[in-house]
Image (cartoon, grey):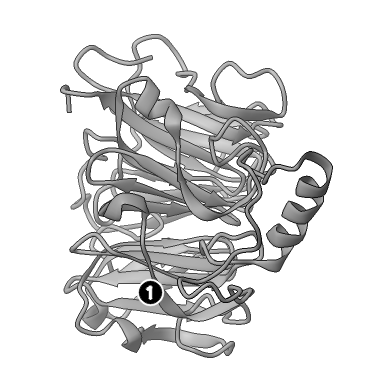
Amino acid sequence: MAVEGSGAWFGFGFCGFGQALGSGCGRQVHSPEPLEAPCAGVDICRVSASWSYTALVTRGGGTHLSGAARGAARGCGDAWASEALLVVRRGPQLQAWSPPSALCGEPLWTHAVAPDAAGTPGPAGEAQAGALPLLPGACAYVSPRPPFYRPLAPELRARRLELGAEHAVLLGATGQVFSWGSGRHGQLGHGTLEAEQEPRLLEALQGLPMAEVAAGGWHSVCVSETGDIYIWGWNESGQLALPTRSLAEEGKAVAAATGLARDGSEVTGAARTEDRTPAPFISVQPFPALLDLPLDSTVVKASCGSRHTAVVTRTGELYTWGWGKYGQLGHKGTSSLDRPCRVEYFVDKQLQVQAVTCGPWNTYVYAVEKGKS
């Protein structure tokens, strides 16, 4: 599907409803495969995925749906998919549908918005500042639950906003991070499990300007301007890249049967810290924790699924970890991981990853041939 001189989108993970995840005919795609374009010659510039369907935004202003919701529309500047609501920005209007009847007939609701100040998504496939669910002008955002249109205080000066299953994370103009919503899994990063009704500044990150934010189902990630990763929230499937009991118990069962760890390596004992003491299991991390990638890699992009995490390094490599039941980690299997692991497919194919966006149970990646970025 790649256009000459540009890159291509790849997908892996859950495709049980017919999402455009490569040529895989089953319910799971365990290794990256080129995304199926809606028609020949179409240049996909953004992907927004929900659990049962996926929205593809093309550079010509089209939106195409695949999966449980089907349909297409022209003249779209952006689209945002959630299980409860599909929102499309068409000129000065927001239009919203309730899947699976999306893009058919009259919208569920419409709302006038400021002129498109954000432009179309960028050439590397990633959405620019102000992309949905944040509205142009950064004065409000879209929610999948009523009220669908929610204003933001102008002093927040939002650059980006990401929604988890029960919380929101906002990146401000000066690199400050705010969060609000449910905090029962520590996903707000304020050190408690309490809910916050209004955006609250993450004091733990004060003085550390951030360039990226991402929200998973019940965990959050941000990337600093210097390429460091900070992560917090629920660690049930290792999505924080911290030791978790569920994976340790699974690993013991696999080792007992095969003598190998979940990733196929030889078992060398339980997880331990640098001083060789047993590593503590962490189910909830209510404060931002600094995460180191292998080889001291610096990060430029991050995205979160329901219970998995993906980041892109400055050198164009993709690392994933967390829940892997449907192949959403891209490591040719369904194992879950509580440590960052490089997706070797893109290294083997001499591809440089430039953008990543996670659906709840799948992952989409934009990559170019090395030397053509």
78 w.r.t. 24: above or below:
below
Visible in this render: residue 26? yes
The quadrant of the picture occupied by the C terminus is top left
The quadrant of the picture occupied by the N terminus is top left
- Nearest the viewer among 289 and 164 is 289
User: In percent of the image, x 19 and y 83: which residue is there?
Assistant: 207
User: In percent of the image, x 23 and y 12: which residue is there?
Assistant: 4
Residue under circle 1? Answer: 151
Image coords of residue 358 (percent x, y): 49, 46
Disc count in the image?
1
Left or right: 311 in relation to 255: left
User: In percent of the image, x 41 and y 75: which residue is there?
Assistant: 289
Using a 10 Å C-alpha cutoff, classify the residue at mark 1 as few (fewer than 14 neighbours), some (14 to 19) or many (20 or more).
few
Q: Amino acid at mark 1?
A: Pro
Image coords of residue 131 (percent x, y): 32, 52
SS of the residue at dot 1? strand
Left or right: 71 in relation to 57: right
117 w.r.t. 270: above or below:
above
Image coords of residue 146 (percent x, y): 58, 68
- Nearest the viewer among 12 and 279 is 279
User: In percent of the image, x 53 and y 72: which residue is there?
Assistant: 276
Q: Tell me where residue 245 sits by quadrant.
A: bottom right
294 w.r.t. 197: above or below:
above
Image coords of residue 9 (percent x, y): 39, 27
Visible in this render: residue 87? no
